[in-house]
């Protein structure tokens, strides 16, 4: 029965059927052949898989990312990053990384980063004489920051499946995200030294100083908001009205470029850490903030654009939730047939050392990421891994970051890496040349993966600080 279950699933995939439909076919075939489970179970389990309050965050985070991408925010982020690090050798490579760090605080997906900000960055790097392979490689690597630095759609899905705190998962992504960015910038600096890349803008104290002032202003606002939102005795005027008015005055007076965009992750993490709103409500807050910036503050959105953005969001959300629904019935069949327990016993028979399991899990997830879409992989594999990490005493927050980063690396690997196809289209490179261009940039990603796998404090320090 189990062989038939997996065989029908793999056969459906081999014929080119989308993985979500293949999972549903395999599950339905097993249920039909068993003769003891009503076929309507498929429908009930698929509906139950998406009938979750935390999953409401998915369409709102997608909507917020699309709004930010269409409201001209990406150009502001690029200008801010250019002012901050464009004067360094290999300047636009550093700009690429810093821009992705900022955009990661709004998009939540690697594909949105690669297709949105990546389009601007690759064109600019080609215009400044950088080899297109170098531009594609750094853009691909930096796009993986999107789901690591919150908000993150894969972390929302993982939190739902593993029954883990989404707020803690979001907080856990900050330090690994910064570490990844630093590793990438070190690699850009090495390339600049070896290939003699120069700066792309002249060094200017006023320009760079202005960017640092923006960062300082964000830090001050973040500290003030955390303090205000954590005070339960203050009324709404002091928690929301006066801080918002002060932020708007500062932005208008100082004529900042990306100050308001930089506040997005501050609002999300600050609100969740202070208990002001849940992760699902944080997604709604992100949409409200994006609408305010697009329609009121920057006035770069109109109603026609809003309709198009809404339709794109509906299409993407439907795809994501259908994958979750199909993977839910697939995972339920795995659990019902006790496949998950058998895998757990087999893994634990090899070794009961957590580091051995983490090493094996990394190798397995890297392989899975080459062939399976991120959301489907998380929904299917979390029920398999959960009993193992519970018995070994591995923190589910720590394992969640390890799992997400592995699957982000999978987005850059053939044959089905989505970022590969997006960047091949944007850069007009062949698929083969895109794969070769990205290969060296796996080094900083693997370095980060090894670090967060075997030094859990890199992941867990901030969640423990914010959620004592």
Image: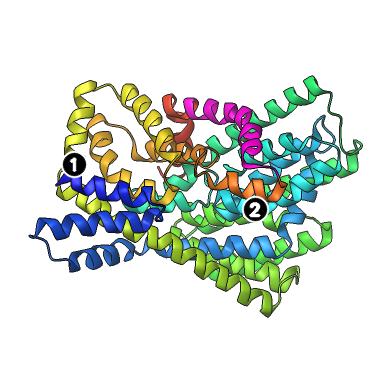
> Residue at point 57% right, 72% down?
310
Examine the rendered structure and indicate whether residue 272 appears above or below residue 235.
above
Residue found at the very far left of the displayed protein: 36
Residue 365 relative to residue 315: left or right: left
Nearest the eye: 115 or 17: 17
Nearest the eye: 41 or 296: 41
The magenta stretch is 429-450
Q: Is residue 59 visible?
A: yes
Residue 301 relative to residue 50: left or right: right
Q: Are marks 1 and 2 in contact (CB under 8 Å)?
A: no
The residue indicated by pointer 1 is 339
Report which quarter residue 125 is drawn in: top right
> Residue at point 52% right, 58% down?
229
Tell whether position 237 is magenta: no
Tell whether position 431 is magenta: yes
Residue 260 relative to residue 204: left or right: left
x, y (%) of residue 305?
67, 74
Determine the CA span between mark 1 and mark 2. 38 Å
The numbered dot on residue 375 is none
The numbered dot on residue 115 is 2
Residue found at the very far bottom of the displayed protein: 303
Where the C terminus falls, by quadrant?
top left
Q: Earlier in the sequence, mark 1 or mark 2?
A: 2
Q: How many marks?
A: 2
x, y (%) of residue 446?
52, 28
Label 2 crowd (10 A; few <14 / some 14-19 / many >=20): some
> Residue at point 29% right, 50% down?
9
x, y (%) of residue 157?
40, 53
Q: Is residue 103 visible?
A: no
């Amino acid at each position: 029965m189990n062989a038939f279950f997996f065989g029908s699933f793999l056969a459906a995939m081999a014929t080119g059927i989308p993985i979500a439909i293949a999972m549903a076919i395999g599950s339905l075939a097993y249920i039909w052949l068993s003769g003891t489970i009503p076929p309507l179970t498929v429908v009930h389990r698929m509906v139950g898989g998406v009938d979750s309050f935390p999953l409401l965050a998915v369409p709102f985070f997608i909507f917020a990312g699309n709004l930010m991408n269409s409201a001209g925010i990406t150009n502001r982020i690029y200008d801010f990053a250019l002012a901050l690090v464009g004067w360094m050798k290999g300047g636009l490579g550093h700009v690429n990384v810093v821009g992705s760090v900022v955009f990661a605080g709004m998009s939540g997906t690697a594909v949105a980063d690669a297709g949105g900000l990546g389009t601007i960055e690759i064109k600019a790097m080609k215009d400044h004489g950088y080899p297109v392979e170098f531009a594609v490689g750094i853009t691909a690597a930096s796009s993986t920051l999107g789901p690591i630095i919150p908000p993150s759609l894969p972390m929302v899905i993982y939190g739902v499946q593993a029954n883990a705190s989404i707020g803690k998962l979001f907080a856990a992504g900050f330090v690994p995200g910064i570490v990844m960015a630093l590793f990438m910038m070190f690699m850009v600096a090495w390339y600049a030294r070896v290939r003699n890349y120069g700066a792309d803008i002249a060094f200017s104290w006023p320009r760079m100083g202005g960017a640092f002032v923006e960062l300082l202003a964000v830090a001050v606002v973040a500290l003030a908001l955390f303090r205000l939102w954590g005070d339960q005795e203050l009324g709404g005027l002091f928690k929301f009205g006066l801080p918002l008015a002060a932020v708007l005055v500062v932005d208008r007076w100082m004529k900042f470029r990306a100050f308001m965009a930089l506040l997005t992750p501050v609002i999300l993490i600050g609100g969740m850490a202070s208990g002001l709103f849940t992760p699902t409500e944080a997604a709604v807050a992100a949409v409200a903030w994006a609408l305010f910036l697009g329609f009121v503050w920057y006035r770069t959105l109109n109603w026609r654009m809003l309709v198009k953005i809404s339709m794109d969001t509906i299409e993407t959300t439907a795809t994501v939730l259908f994958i979750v629904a199909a993977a839910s019935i697939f995972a339920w069949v795995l659990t019902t047939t006790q496949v998950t327990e058998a895998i757990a016993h087999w893994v634990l028979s090899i070794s009961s050392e957590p580091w051995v399991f983490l090493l094996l899990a990394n190798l397995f997830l890297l392989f899975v990421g080459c062939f399976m879409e991120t959301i489907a992989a998380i929904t299917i594999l979390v029920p398999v891994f959960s009993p193992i990490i519970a018995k070994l005493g591995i923190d589910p927050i720590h394992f969640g970051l390890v799992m997400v980063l592995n699957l982000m690396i999978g987005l850059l690997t053939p044959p089905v890496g989505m970022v590969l196809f997006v960047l091949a289209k944007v850069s007009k490179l062949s698929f083969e040349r895109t794969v070769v261009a990205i290969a060296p940039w796996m080094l900083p990603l693997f370095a980060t993966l090894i670090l967060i796998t075997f030094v859990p404090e890199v992941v867990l320090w901030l969640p423990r600080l914010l959620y004592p």
